[in-house]
Image (spheres, coloured by chain):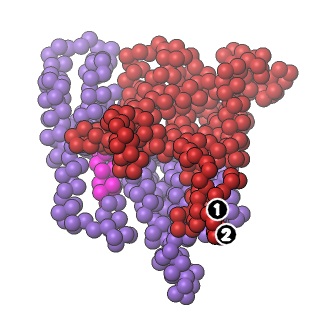
Amino acid sequence: MWWYVGKRLLQTIPVILGATFIIYALVFLRPGDPIAGLFGEKPVNEGVKEQIEAQYNLDKPFLVQWLLFLKGAVTLDFGNSYTGRPVIDLVSQAFPVTITLALMALAIEMVLGIVAGTIAGLRRGGLFDSTMLVTSLIVIAVPIFVFGFVLQLIFGVKLGWVDPTVGGDWSVSKLILPAFVLGLVSFAYVLRLTRTSVAENLSTDHVRTARAKGLTQRQVVKNHVLRNSLIPVVTFLGVDLGALMAGAVVTESIFNIPGVGNLAYNAIKRGENPTVVSVVTIMVLVYVLASLLVDLLYAWLDPRIRYA
Amino acid sequence: MPEIAIRPGQERFVAPLEETPLQDVDSVDLSAAPESQWKEAWKRLRKSPLFWISGTLLVIIAIVVAFPGLFTSADPSYENLSDSLAPAREGHPLGFTQQGGDVWARTLYGARASVAVGVFATLFVTVVGVVTGAIAGFFGGWVDSLISRLSDIFFSIPLLLAAIVVISIINNIWPERQFWGSVFVVVGALALFAWPQITRQMRGAVLSVKSLEFVDAATAIGASRWKNLVRHIVPNAMAPVIVTATITLGVFIVAEATLSFLGLGLPRSSVVSWGNDIAAAQVLVRSGQHLEVMFVPATALAITVLAFILLGDAVREAFDPKARKK
């Protein structure tokens, strides 16, 4: 088990190295002088420019810059943004909001998706099943920001149940509507996955055996159908955490949430390269760790899987 | 129902070859030659109502994409501020946008850009994914390791963020793009980080197909490695990829709209697209007025995406009839 965890952690190293390299190359090889913008309309002072370039390692070859970034990142030192603030400060302010938002979205999509998917799968072809299928198709087909605006209009503006926007002083209760919007598309996928998986498992031999033993429907579903059906769902949810963090770019801009997505988006627009690279690196880390967690959850869900 | 060969003394139930587990069969249809997976899938597809519904929708969409002028005489790029949010009138059945453009004409002409992004991004991703996935699965060894690690790397970077970075960079280098330039920038940005999904799927499918008996049979009658791969393995491993590709096409169309919402999709100045029109109408929705200006392009987009998703579902069922029967 621990040997497996160690092996998997080692395997993530090339992924993280490669991913940071690609983002670093994309961001820093783009034409244009990031320093020139700092001077605004004033003439560029060559001495100051050289000093700033040295401070941000821009005078060194590209590969050296990347290695220096990695060296700092290991100790969570992501350098300074071009406005002089340490990137880690910006990130540590924004990160808690987004991870809360993403985890809330994950919880919402998981609970709603698995419950609705199980009911739909058990009564395949019924009214509930058909309604849920149509709902999930619509949710997938309509861009998420359309739902965002409509729900914001209905619950925030017209009904006044929630604050339409979140703003600087965020709280968990303010994030409920944004988290619902963020988790909506994944809810549809979880629902469809669970439904198919439950329906498939219902006709397996071990479920027939469980019924023959005289177990109640409830026990059969809980212990024999669901546990097997959840394996593909867990895979999806694990990969989805990373996707939710990235999808937060849209949700955060609709509801004005000061999270990582907003930070990344503004940094990309302003050419704040150190911030962009750091945020993407952190998102890659979240994705990689979440997939590792999923692999370990497998062993718990499916005792046939053993990690030697 | 094809003619079924019944051996002497055998009067029990005889099931058709397809869709029946082996142990339930007493004898099989010997008269018909075995058909390829593709022919069988097409036979089932023809009977699927889902296929005909989505197919009809897609034909209509294709006609709109090719000849938007058939359905309107208004110029989609003509905007007159004195018509801002004006109600419907003769020749303009759905009223006007905030900028004074014709909603109906813009929605018809907007199909081209949105569908083009979806189709070309999917083509690119499928070709790259099938080639790399087939090579990795078939040859194994260091080629497999290299391709798998590369796809891990590209898969770990969030698609939307990566696309935003790529497009914002290209905006700096190449700000003045015309229609096809803009479309291919979005296609490239989306496709660059989306191919690993197809690669992984193709690799898995090739791995499971390459150990099947008919591959050994082909080798036995003297097929070369390459011929085996191209003629026998790839066609039999394509089914899951085709399904994913159809659904991915819809996802790309939604992604283009999302990028436009963030102001990094197709430039509003040179391209009429659904994403742009939906994004431009967001101000109206915030104030709760003239929701129809967003509703029309959003519905057109949703119907198109739905058509592709339903087609994907129909194709999935055609290749895997067991899934539907259960």
For image coordinates 32% across by 36% down, the residue present is B225
For image coordinates 34% across by 41% down, the residue present is B219
For image coordinates 24% across by 34% down, the residue present is A21
From the viewer's side, name the closer residue of A305 and B176: A305
- Disc 2 target residue: B11
| Mark 2 neighbour density, 10 Å: few (under 14) some (14–19) many (20 or more) | few
* Residue A290 included in the magenta stretch of the image: yes
From the viewer's side, name the closer residue of A165 and A192: A192
Q: Give the residue furthest to the bottom.
A: A214
* Chain letter, purple: A
* Chain letter, red: B
* Residue A285 included in the magenta stretch of the image: yes
The magenta segment is: A279-293
Q: Is residue B87 left or right of residue A67?
A: right
Q: Is residue B260 left or right of residue A239?
A: right
Up/down of A101 relative to A198, above or below: above
